[in-house]
Amino acid sequence: MSGPDPLQDERAQTVWAYLQRFHRGQHRAVKSVALAKLTGLNDRQVRRIASDLTLADYPIGSSGDGFFLCETAGDFRASIDWLDQHVFPTLKRRRVLEGQLERLEELQGQASFEEPTVEQMTLL
C-alpha cells in the first residue's frame, strides 16, 4: 500500500463496512447507486472510494452487478474481466485520438498562419 490509508476517511470506512458485512463475493454485488443510498453518499463518491480502496490493496471487485468484496479466485477473475471490457475500448479510443493529434500537429507544421479545420484533418 502506498500513500495514506483511505480507511482514515469516515466515508471510506462506511463503504468498506457495508461491503464486508453484506456484499462478500460477486454473487452479493451491490450497485453503486444502491450503496450510495445505504451510506448517505452520492454515486460518484462511492465509485471513487471503491477505486481508492482497491488501489490501496483492499480486495474490492466490480462487475456489471456492482461492487463486492473479493473472496475467491473467481471473484478476482470476474472483476479483472469486467475491467478489461472497459479498458480495451478506452485504449482503442486513445489510440485514435493520438493519431488525430499527430495529423493535427503535421498540419500545424505545414501552415504557420492558420489552424487546420476538422475537415482538413479527416482528409489526411
Image (tube, helix red, strand yellow):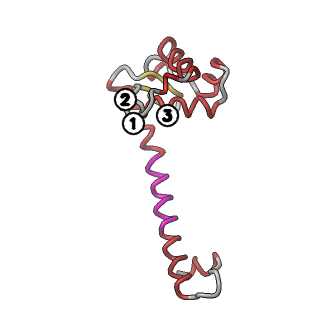
Check disc 2 and report its element: helix, strand or loop: helix
Sequence-first disc among 3 and 1: 3
Vertical placement of residue 85 versus 54, above or below: below
Q: Residue at x 45, y 17 (%)?
A: 24
Report how far apart the C-alphas of labels 2 and 1 lie in the structure.
Answer: 6 Å
Report how far apart the C-alphas of labels 2 and 3 lie in the structure.
Answer: 15 Å
- Identify residue type, mark 2: Phe
The quarter of the picture where the N terminus appears is: top left
Extent of the magenta region: 87-98
Residue under pointer 2 = 76
Q: Residue at x 49, y 22 (%)?
A: 7
Q: Residue at x 41, y 25 (%)?
A: 58
Residue contact between numbered discs 2 and 1, judged by CB atoms under 8 Å: yes
Q: Which circle, 2 or 3, is nearer the viewer?
A: 3
- Identify residue type, mark 1: Ile
Q: Position of residue 32 (x, y in %)?
A: 59, 28
Front residue of 42/8: it is 8
Residue contact between numbered discs 2 and 3, judged by CB atoms under 8 Å: no
